Amino acid sequence: MERNETLMQYFEWYLPADCGHWRRTAAAAGALAAQGITAVWLPPAYKGAGGVREVGYAVYDTYDLGEFDQKGTVPTKYGTRQEYLNAIAALHSAGIKVYPDIVLNHRIGADGTEQVTAEESDGKDRNREITGDETITAYTRFDFPGRGGKYSDFRWNWHHFDGVDWDETKRKNAIYQFTGKEWDSEVDGENGNYDYLMGADLDMGNQEVLEELDRWGAWYLETTGADGFRLDAVKHIRFTFFKDWLGKLRQRSGKPLFAVGEYWKNDVGTLLRYLDACGDCMSLFDVPLHFNFYNASHGGGGYDMRNILKGTLLEARPERAVTFVDNHDTQPGQALASWVDGWFKSIAYALILLRGEGLPCVFYGDYYGIPHDKINPVGGDLMTMLRVRSERAYGVRRDYFDDPNVIGWTMEGTEEHPASGLAVVLSDGAGGKKRMSVGARNAGATFAPVTGGGQAVVIGPDGTAEFSVEGGSARVYIRI
Ligand code: CA
C-alpha cells in the first residue's frame, strides 16, 4: 500500500556543537519512521571554515566528512565520517530516504592567498564596474594539506572562481570580480546579477570546475549512498548547471535522485521560470507559501484565509512543490528570519500535511523545539497530523476556502486505505462552523476531532455534516 511521503529537515541552526548529531540521528531513525517520516534532509556534512562550530554553509573541503584534522578538528559539528555513514545506514534500515545538503556555490576558509587582478563590482548593480583593474590579495588557494590528497588531488586556485569579497592587502570588503571573468549569466537578476553570494564564488563556466564537481558528486554518492539532494543557493548558480550535474549522476547511478532546490524568492513566477531554465530537473521549496504563513501568523486574525494558498508553487505546480513552514534560515536570529508565529503552526502544518498535494518538509525546530530561543515544540498537533497524513489523507479532496476567517477541506478516503478520510477546519480569527461534504461513501460514518478539541459529528445521508473550529486554531476530524 502506497503511503504519503513526508520529508523532515533534520537540523536547526543552533544544534549543540558537540559532534553528537549523527549519533542522535541514528538513534532517532526508528521513531521518525514510526511517526510517518519517509525522508530526511541532513545538514552539509563536510568540513566548513568554522570547524566544529560550522553549521555547514561556509564550505571548506567537500571530501572531508569528519575524517581529517582540518580547521582545528577531525569531526564536523555533527560528528565523524563514520558516524555520518552510520546515521545514513540507520535511516535506510528504518526505510527513510536520505537527502544531503549540497553547497556548491562557494568555498570559504582558503589555505592561502594569491595576488589577483580584479575590478570592484557595484554591490547593487553587479554588472557595473566601479574601479579599474587593481591587484588584490584574494583567499583562493585551497590545497587541503590536512587531507594530503586522499580521495582527490584537486587543488583550487583563483582560476576556478569568479570573484571574492575581501582584499587582504587593503583589508577591504567589496565585491571583486577577477579580471577576464564574467559573473555567470543565467542567475537570479537581483542586484543586476546575483551570481556572487559569499566567499570565493565558483566559476561554473570553467571546465576544470565542472569536471571536479562531477567527480566529487560521483564520489559523494558512492560514499554515502544518498537517495537525492537538497541543493543550496540555486539562484546564485548558473541555471543550467544542475541539469547537467544531476543528469550525469542519475545516469551513472541509475537512481532517480530526488532533488529539491533552495531558490529563495517570494515570487512564484520566478520559481516557475527557474524550473523551466533548469530543465525541470528538481523540485523547489515553496517560498511564497512560507511567506503567506508568515504574513497570516502576524496578521492578528485579519489575514484573508481564502488567499492562504494564492501565489504559491503548491497552487501553480504542486508536483514540484516542497512545502515547509520554517527552516534553519527563517528561524529567529538567522539570515532570512521570518518565523511563523507559534499560534499559527498547527494551521500551517495542517495545510502542508493534510491536503494530499506537495511534498511537505517538517522542520526540526518545530518537531523538537529550539532551546536556544526557548521555542517549544509544536507538540501533539504536529505529531497527530503526521500520523493522520500517513494513514488517512487520501482520496477525493473538496475545498471550502470561502470565508476570510474559517476555511476547510475534506478528503473522502479510498478503499485502498481503510482508515482514510478526514475533514479539516481552520480559522485565523474567530471560531465558526462549516457544512462540508466527505462524499457519499462516508454517509452515516462518525468523524471525531483529533486536534483542536470539539465533539464528534455523524455524516448525514447526503455525505455532509457541519464541522466546527475554535478561534485561531486547526481542528482535524478523522473517520472512526
Ligand atoms: Ca555563484
Image: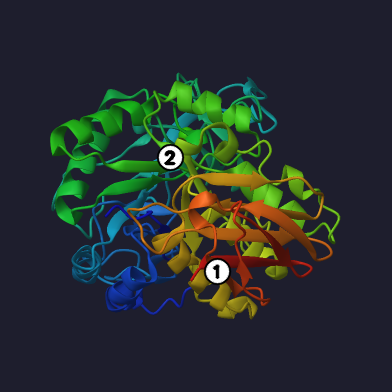
Q: Earlier in the sequence, mark 1 or mark 2?
A: 2
Q: Amino acid at mark 1?
A: Thr
Residue 71 image label: none
Instruction: Report the residue marked by disc 2.
Output: 105
Q: Position of residue 433 (x, y in %)?
A: 77, 61
What number of labels is visible?
2
Instruction: Report the residue marked by disc 1.
Output: 446
Q: What's the coloring here?
A: rainbow
Residue shown at 71% from the left, 55% from the top: 435
Q: Residues within 10 Å of mark 2 (few under 14, many from 20)?
A: many
Residue shown at 48% from the left, 68% from the top: 364
Q: Position of residue 132 (x, y in %)?
A: 61, 21
Query: Can residue 10 be spotted in the picture?
Result: yes
Helix, strand or loop at label 2? It is: loop
Which mark's residue is nearer the viewer, 1 or 2? 1
In this rendering, the answer to whether 23 lies above or below 259 is: below
Q: CA distance from mark 1 to mark 2?
A: 53 Å
Mark 2 residue's CB less than 8 Å from ligand 1: yes
Q: Position of residue 114 (x, y in %)?
A: 40, 39
Residue shown at 66% from the left, 76% from the top: 455
In this rendering, the answer to whether 458 lies above or below 188 is: below
Residue shown at 82% from the left, 62% from the top: 429
